[in-house]
Image (spheres, helix red, strand yellow):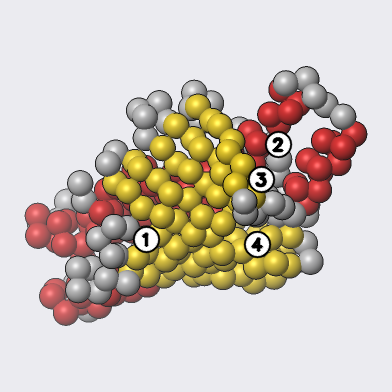
Amino acid sequence: MKRNEFLNRDFLRRISFLVKIALIFFLLKPAMAGDVNDETTRFLKKLDLNYYCLRRQGLKKFKCDLESSRIEKLVKECANKYGWNDERTLSIEKIGFNLLYKENGNWEFGMNSPPPMNGDFDFINTFVVPIANIYAETQNIFKAWAVATIESFPYSSEDESKNEFRIEKTKDGFDFIETLTNDDTVTTSFDPNGKALMSSFDLKGVKGVSKFNYEETSKGYLLKEIEVDFPNNSKQIYQYSYQTISGFWMLSKISMTISDQKKFPDDDALSVVFKNYKIN
């Protein structure tokens, strides 16, 4: 299986739900067993407040524009091949992404000027297909952040509702173990306060460990980084930078870097800038 195919189709989707789902099922287990009391209620509320949540801060909706470093690189490569005034280069130069986050919690990605599909095969294969991959990968990395940072408890997903869950106490906190419908597993470790530390996963035979890095702010834990280690000694790091817009900590930049440069050269690096926000 190709590395990008795996990331785009499965792993990042799991990461996007992992932290919220784990905490929800752990915390609601006493309530589902009928053991609801004031102490449980206070604990739920306290743990909810541990994480920075844009919804809780008053965010309703927003839209913004996105610029990708990979698109800029493709423009230069296209110009070197066809010339700066060639219509193929000009069509790529116009490409930009946009994002709309709605009040109902749904989001839409768009492309303001899709590349032409009626060019020669070499142009489509060399430039149009990579643009489609950049578009998909940007969405996945954003979704990993959005579910962990925008939505408040309780959060649920129909995709995850058929999975099996169990909790195991550890000397450093607790483990949340999720068995998926195809017998794949994801185990997330938390400290005693419910802060996600790391996850080990076995998805379709691909094994690895992901580590979470949060910034502790006055308004709760703010997701800054997801580091993914694979058995072949390659490492992928997803980083999230912020800017203050109308009092909200909104994304200013997301990036993906890969440590195994011999296997995956720097043309696999991804950097996306968020700008021109309009909020609520």
Mark 2 vs mark 4, foreground winner is 2
- Kind of residue indicated by mark 2: Leu
Task: For mark 4, give the secondary structure.
Answer: strand
Q: Residues within 10 Å of mark 2 (few under 14, many from 20)?
A: some
Q: Between 28 and 8, which is closer to the camera in this rendering?
A: 28
**To which residue does mark 1 refer?**
229
Q: Contact, CB < 8 Å: mark 1 with mark 3?
A: no
Give the Cα distance between marks 1 and 4. Answer: 22 Å
- Tell which circle, 1 or 3, labels the residue nearer the N-terminal end: 3
**Disc 3 residue type (three-letter):** Glu
Q: Which numbered tag is attached to residue 222?
A: 4
Labels 1 and 4: the sequence-earlier one: 4
**Could you tell whether 213 is left or right of 181 in the image?**
right
Residue at the spot x=63%, y=33% of the render? 25
Mark 1 to mark 3: distance in Å? Answer: 27 Å
> In the figure, is residue 146 to the left or right of 2?
right
User: Residue 52: x percent and y percent?
Assistant: 71, 57
Q: Secondary structure at mark 1?
A: strand
Return the residue at label 2.
Answer: 27
Question: Which residue of the protein is positioned furthest toward the left in this rendering?
Answer: 121
The outermost residue toward the right is 38
Q: Cα distance, mark 2 to mark 4? A: 20 Å
Lower sequence index among marks 3 and 4? 3
**Is mark 3 in CB contact (under 8 Å) with mark 4?**
no
Q: Amino acid at mark 1?
A: Asp
Which type of secondary structure does the marked residue at label 2 adopt?
Answer: helix
Residues 120 and 177: in front is 177
Secondary structure at badge 3 equals loop
